Amino acid sequence: MALADALPPGPRAAFPDRLDLPGRLRQVWERWDDLPAGATRTLAGSVDGAEVDPLAVDRLLAGAPPEVLVHLMAATDAGPAHRAVSLYLSHLADVRTALSGKDLKALGLTPGPDYRKILSTLRDLRIEGKVHSREDELAWLRREGYAPEG
């Protein structure tokens, strides 16, 4: 990615084919090539010294391989992008819910696609600082009607 940063759009688009990038490298390129520009757009509201939105950072960087995150730091000016990558690596990448699918099943929820939605929402709430514990997560489930009271 770093090698192609200075290329104009046409040659840049042809870059993976010209180098005949193999499997994983091609997948990384196709998925993450636009990350520096995307990070700049996503973090445009952040100015030096301002906090970056943790949820926006998580959504932008979730799943990015380490080499892509290093490239992002190198390809962008110091400031919001650097703070975002640092925040992601030091805190956000490791955020987990206290509850699991087993817990949802024990509460009587039918296994299925809603589990992912519920657990993803609980993780987002943790990132936003709205829930901090297993008890907070259970209280949220009750408030939202997913779990019985008490």
Image (cartoon, rainbow, N blue to C red):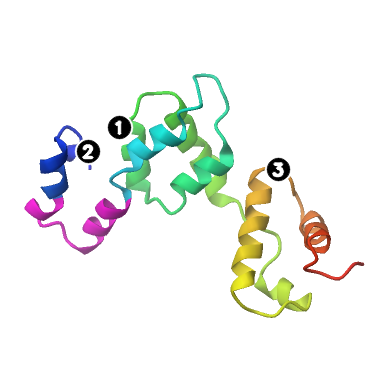
The magenta-colored residue range is 16-31
Quadrant of image for the N terminus: top left
Identified by mark 2, the residue type is Ala
Q: Residue 113 versus residue 134: which sits nearer the camera?
A: 113
Identified by mark 1, the residue type is Ala
Earlier-in-chain disc, 3 versus 2 = 2
Using residue 140 as the reference point, say whether residue 20 is left or right of it.
left
Q: Is residue 43 above or below residue 91?
A: above
Main SS, magenta region, reads helix
Kindly identify which residue carries mark 1.
75
Q: Position of residue 131 (x, y in %)?
A: 75, 49
Q: Mark 1 packing: few (<14 Cα in 10 Å), some, or many (20+)? A: some
Kindly identify which residue carries mark 3.
129
Using residue 9 as the reference point, say whether residue 104 is left or right of it.
right
Q: Are marks 2 and 1 in contact (CB under 8 Å)?
A: yes
**Whole-number angstrom distance, CA of label 3 to CA of label 2:** 35 Å
**Whole-number angstrom distance, CA of label 2 to CA of label 1:** 7 Å
Q: Are marks 3 and 1 in contact (CB under 8 Å)?
A: no
Using residue 110 as the reference point, say whether residue 3 is left or right of it.
left
Q: Which residue is rendered at x = 66% and y = 43% of the image? A: 128
Q: Is residue 104 above or below residue 26?
A: below
